[in-house]
Every structure is written in C-alpha cells, then in structure tokens.
Image: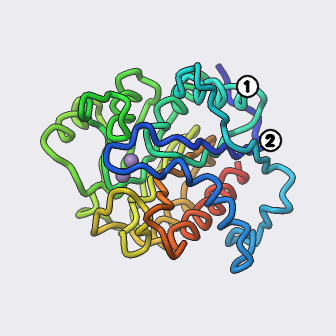
Amino acid sequence: MQERPPSTVTILGIPNDDGSSYLRGAAQAPDVIRQAFRSPSSNTCCETGLDLDAEPRLLDAGDLEFDVDLAPFDQIETTVGELLDGGSRVLTLGGDHAIAYPILKAYGQRYERLSLLQLDAHPDLYDELDGNYLSHACPFARIMEEGLVARLVQIGIRTLNPHQSMQAERFGVEIIEMRDWDPTTVPEFEAPLYLSLDLDVLDPAFAPGVSHHEPGGLSVREVIRVIQDLNVPLVGADLVELNPTRDPSGVTAMVAAKLFKEIAAKMLEG
Ligand code: MN
Ligand code: MN
C-alpha cells in the first residue's frame, strides 16, 4: 500500500439512503448539490478564487448506478476502490452517512495510518440500531472495529448517550463535544487525512434540510474555517445527509454546495 499521487479529485454521487433510520430522502442529494453548485445565484469559485468549473484536475464520475442484483455497499466499496487505484482521490456526495463505512473500507485497504475527521451532531457509533448494523447510526463503529483508520476525531457532537460514550471509549475515539467547542483550537493531524462531513453538524438554523434536526450546532462559517485551516491535505471526503425533502427553500442545498467547493479546494491543495 502506498499513497496515491496528488493528481485528480473525482466527484462521485452515491444516491443511497437505505441506512436512514428516521426519514428517507438523502438519496436525492447528489443531483441537488450539483444544481446548487451551478446555480446562477452564485458562482463556481471557492473562497481563494479558484474556479472549480475551470479546474481540469476536478472530474465528475456522475452517480453510482446500483445494480439491483448486487449488495449496494459492495458496489460503493468497489467503485471508490477503482477510482483510488486509478490515481484519483474521491469526493463523494451522499446519500446518508451509512455510506461512510464502505467508502472507508476502500480507503483503509489503500492508505496506512489514515486519520479520519468526522463533523457531525451524532457520533454514529451504535453497535446496531433497530437491529440494523449498517444503519447510518453505526458506520464509525464498523470502521473502528475493522481498524480501517488509525485515528478518529469527531467535532460537533451533542447527542452522546451512555452506550455511545462506552463505544467511544472502547475505540479510543477523540470527541470534541459541542459544549466544549472552541473555534480557535482545531486539532492537528498527520497525513493522510480523510474528512466525513454530516450536514447535521450545522445548527438547524443554518441547515434545516437534514433528517435529524439537532439544535446547538456549528455555524456555516465555523465549518468552513475548520476545512480551510486543516494542517494537512485531504486524501478523500464525503458530504452526506442533505435531505432535499426537508429543504423547500433550497438554502441547505446552497450550504452543501458551498461546503462542497471548500472541500474540493482543500483536496486540490494536496
Ligand atoms: Mn452522521
Ligand atoms: Mn448526524
């Protein structure tokens, strides 16, 4: 295993919300994020001025087209793995957060000592939820059990219960709870680093178009600041849990497109 050359970044839509425990809808997100990115109400530049629409290193593989005869998570793992083997880093647009498990399976087999930064209202460390061990409440338990990453840091957490606290301790997860959040102290990482961004890390005042409204979260500017200030490049990222059925004004889609641009820019730095 070795690191891929820092050449291209490929966008991959994953229209899958099979793991959603409360509401469906996140499967509609990839197209909605692309439309918001191209909305004439804004432009396609990130905040450094880099125009992503004119960036030859940023490719779009479209959406994963699921074969109904195959297990969806196997197809996610295979497709992401093929892109990585082709020398590209991958920026996936979810989908719900359950897809992080097969994505990190592909990454974990190719990157040694991977660090994982999760921005989320929820730790997603349940052993199982409603009998489903592939629920979007569980992916980081699976990732840690299988040793797919060397380090997991979570920011924005504000829903810890006794079971998930126990799981976090068991797996050695570094949790920066929202009640302890200090925007001036973003942790430092060693490369390679992967970012998993659940939009419900944001306060629902900024991003109502998610399935789980959890008040007391981060502002859009704080999340942008975390992305821009990361001390190492990103080898991969996912942007998950936009639920367009709860976003009639489209404001959360614009937030997702904004974060997509800043993540892509950060990935292209490396
Ligand atoms: Mn999540
Ligand atoms: Mn969440």
Residue located 54% across and 28% down the image: 72
Circle 2 packing at 10 Å, graded few (<14), some (14-19), many (20+), is few
**Proximity of marks 1 and 2: CB atoms separated by less than 8 Å:** no
Q: Which amino acid does label 1 sit on?
A: Asp
Give how far across and how far down residue 244 sits, in percent. 50, 61
Residue located 77% across and 32% down the image: 87
Give how far across and how far down residue 3 sits, in percent. 68, 29
Question: What separation in Å lies between label 1 and label 2 (alpha carbons)?
Answer: 12 Å
Residue located 73% across and 25% down the image: 85
| Circle 2: element type | loop
Give how far across and how far down residue 165 sits, in percent. 19, 41
Give the farthest residue toward the front: 68
Mark closer to the chain start, 1 or 2: 2
Residue located 87% across and 52% down the image: 56
The residue where tag 2 is placed is 7
Quadrant in the picture for residue 77: top right
Nearest the eye: 174 or 241: 241
Nearest the eye: 117 or 70: 70
| 217 to the left or right of 241 | left
Quadrant where the N terminus sits is: top right
Label annotation for residue 85? 1
Q: Can you tell me whether the CB of the residue at mark 1 lies under 8 Å from the nearest atom of ligand 1?
A: no
Q: How is the image coloured?
A: rainbow
